[in-house]
Amino acid sequence: MAIARNDTSVLGRWWWTVDRWTLAALVALAAVGMILTVTASPPVAERIGADPFYFARKQGVLLLPALAIMLTVSLADLRLVRRVAVAMLGGSLLLLAGTLLFGAEIKGATRWVSIAGFTVQPSEFVKPAFAVVGAWMFSAQRLGEEIPGFVIATGLYALVLTLLLLQPDVGQAAVLSAIWFTQFFLAGLPMAAVIAMAGLGAAGMVAAYFAFPHVQSRIDRFLDPGLGDSYQIDRAMEAFSAGGVFGRGPGQGTVKTVLPDGHADFIFAVAGEEFGLIACLVIVAIFAFVVLRGFARVLHDNDLFVVLAATGLLMQFGLQALINMASTLSLIPTKGMTLPFISYGGSSLIALAVGMGMLLALTRKRPGVMG
């Protein structure tokens, strides 16, 4: 873009302060996601009686608005980022409660609510919103403001965690817990409390195993595949094996014809079969680049709120990608979680766009900040 360094317009200041490398990486992920949706979704659409490009068209219609939202949010200053997060958290909490009252049960869980003809998954929006609001509360108390920030952040965490477990959605609860714990630790959690919370976290995982039959089933099948149905994982592993180093070629894969979630939670398997190991490693590298680049930026920042909020957003983004890819590769028990910007899903795409827009806004160069 031909924008002079002395351009003082909103766009000019944005262009010379935003992290353009991270922006380019996120756009690249969105482009990869669109390509994979086009190649992976036709068999799924045909199985439900829709035209072959039903899912691809829906994803494409949402992609440009999502990118526009990300760019618009990245223009915000720190105060506006906090306001956006508070508004999104409030709306997400209402919708989370609404899923329990009015949501439709799908595969034994109630995670979606219908609004004006659109199906929304509120848990996708609550994660980035909580990361920013929690960071605000933690930093406020740590910096001596007359706000019981630790108590408010912990209370919000407990409320969101309860709503997620009632759906139930143990995976999203685990991601939320990682965000809260990491921010609390960075804000100055005493070591004794760190050890105690680590113990509580381990106890919580054990409790989840016994409290939620679907969690128990997934862990048991991971430890001993002969105990139950491992159809999707078996097909995914066959896809990676068939793809080899360079893949069978775009559109030449067969796993998408038999994988129910080949366009969503298991889209990484389609990438492995059609584009091969090298393409999968490139995808992994882009995710790693976004996370490491983000942490490198915040290491030079002297604003505690920025450090905590950016860390929470990066934790959500990186952990979600790691869980999805590790599940598809059978490295951990399966967990229905989208691959950021790549899996099909409107709620995930829009929520990630807002979250990464806030990350870009937080990591922009500001007067008095190193780097």
Image (spheres, rainbow, N blue to C red):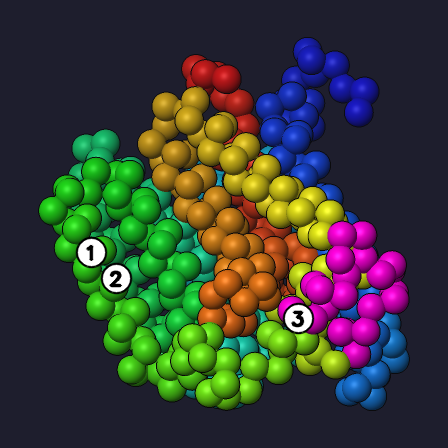
Q: Amino acid at mark 2?
A: Gly
Q: Secondary structure at mark 1?
A: helix
Residue beneath disc 2: 201
The total number of labels drawn is 3
Q: Secondary structure at mark 2?
A: helix
Separation (CA) of disc 1 from disc 3: 36 Å
- Disc 1 crowd rating (10 Å Cα; few below 14, some 14-19, many 20+) is few
Q: Amino acid at mark 1?
A: Met
Residue appearing at x 45%, y 39% in the figure: 310
Residue beneath disc 1: 197
The percent position of residue 139, horizontal first and vertical second, equals 29, 38
Q: Find the magenta span and give its range.
A: 236-257
Residue beneath disc 3: 236
Residue appearing at x 70%, y 63% in the figure: 240
Classify residue 154 by image quadrant: bottom left
In the image, is 135 to the left or to the right of 54?
left
Res. 295 mark: none
Q: Nearer the viewer, residue 274 or 79?
A: 274
